[in-house]
Amino acid sequence: MKNIINIASLLLLLGSLKVLAVPYQLTTLAEDLNYPWSLAFLPDNSMLLTERTGKLKHLSAAGELLAAVAPGLPQLYVAAQGGLLEVLLPDTFEQNQQLLLSYVCGDADANTLCLATARWQQQQLTDIKLIFKAEPYRQGAAHYGGRMLQLPDGSILLTLGDGFDYREQAQNPANHLGKIVRLNPDGSIPADNPFALQGGYAPQIYSLGHRNVQGIVLDRVTQQLYSHEHGPRGGDELNIIVPGQNYGWPVATRGIDYTGARVSPFRQYPGMVEPIWHWSPSIAPAGMTLYQGGLFLDWQGDLFITALAGKALHQLVMENGKVVTEQLLLTELNSRLRDVRTGPDGALYVLTDSASGKLLRLTPAQPSGD
Amino acid sequence: MPVSLLLIRCRLNGKNMQTTSDGKSISDGKGISKLKKLLAFAIAVVLAAALGSIVQSQFNLLAIAALVEQVPLRGWLYTIWFDLRSFTPTLLVIMAPVLLLALFAGQMLRHTAGLSRLWLAVGCSLAGFLLALWAINNLAPMPTLIAATRSVQGSLALALCAAAGAAIYVRLTRISD
């Protein structure tokens, strides 16, 4: 009996160490990036990269700088957490060269998250149009969200933050603070949004009760939609997003304020969805990809999450919408990590977060010659 | 028992002579007077921070109560207790220098302003705490460090706690002046 237990323990251990057994090699593709924020792959495998300080850079697949432009975005506001955020290439990009840019617009006294379309042609951004502006304006330059995802029906999910000082507004269905919104690529409102016809609700709302969502991915196999959000001190969350649901902030949270004060007496609350995973102390999750590439066969279906405060790439092994194990990668860099993407070549691409940020590529380790 | 602990047990505005646990008398000279002021200051800061913690809990709880059907009394009380242990140290770090500078400023102004020591200490600590909040919120990475001070009412309420601390200090050191 004892032997059986020992063998079972060994098998369990081997199972949990599976992710450890995948060695990788790290290549620095680009350096001296000024607070890089997001990455998107063009059809020719070259990349568009945003710098929060306002530049859009075009890099070759090998990471060489091909072009850098400062898009003339209406009322671009660069301060603290604000600036140029995400670039998204919708599936129609090859036909019309149109992309989406999320950015912070306004000024110190009145700013918000804006969404613009633009055309990327001959290494220039033209035809820039503002298509959405989150309401209301707020003071301070924190908690904008800013990540985007295109759903299979072509609509766009845009994540938003609570503006830090306005956390109770995440429960106010009449505005966009602390929400995920769903839009058509031209900024119009899909008729089948969960609250499109409900009085007192902003019709763009897809889900509510979020603090600062900076990672959103769709598992195209299971159709499960994952997002993560920053908690305050503790209480970072990984959620499965269901349209129309309330994710609790600031009523239901495992986090406390940076000062040590309790945000709420509730960790759970009836009618509010609980996270499927949470981090306390906070890791500050800032980007996410669901790996379905061809290079790391053992990593299929795993979530990879970049952490700013945690200074690691968190690998979550998923099974039926549940986290089985968590493994930390890239801790050797001791760097704040902003974003992670799966490249068309199956490699993982990671952005570090600093005034001299880097673009890194993870590939399987080459077998040694001996 | 250490002398300092024994002195806490004594009346701070007591007699010129005090007694240690083994019956020996010690002189209440200049050094003891400074110790008394130090103890009075420590008590004032701790009470002001604890009061401030209780007050800020009410602001946070009221904000949550407005979003839900009901906050159970048990949750309400536990939040106050939690904050007393977890938030008070933060407020101590803010209150201590504010009260120190405010009491010093009050002392300096005493001969020119023509106001009582109590009102000067209260006024200076009130203004000093609001100034400190302004400075912290300009220096900290987040827009507002203490959630309760997002509103004018919350800022004033916590500033009044600082003022209460100043008043406690003046009361405790009344006779030694």
Image (tube, grey):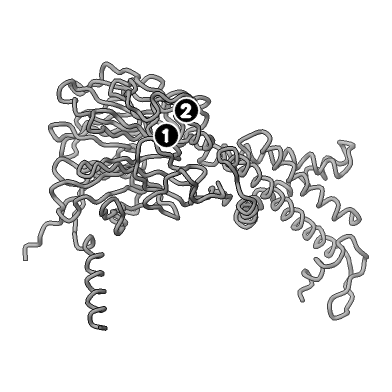
Rendered location of residue A347, percent (x, y): 17, 46
User: As shown in the figure, which amino acid type bears the numbered disc 2?
Assistant: Asn
- Can you identify the residue that label 1 sits on? A179
Taking A144 as reference, is A316 above or below it? below
User: What's the amino acid at mark 1?
Assistant: Lys
Across and down, in percent, residue B72 comes to: 61, 49
Tell me the tag on residue B136.
none
Q: Which residue is mark 2?
A: A175
**Quadrant occupied by the N terminus of chain A:** bottom left
Q: Measuring from the top left, give residue B105's x and y in whole percent.
A: 78, 43
Q: Quadrant of the C terminus of chain A?
A: bottom left
Position of B11 compared to A365: left or right?
A: right
Q: Helix or strand or loop: what does disc 1 sit on?
A: strand
Q: Numbered disc 1: what chain?
A: A
**Mark 2 residue crowding within 10 angstroms, few (<14) / some (14–19) / many (20+):** many
Q: Chain of mark 2?
A: A
Marks 2 and 1 on same chain:
yes
| Residue A25 in view in this figure | yes
Quarter-of-image position of residue A42: top left
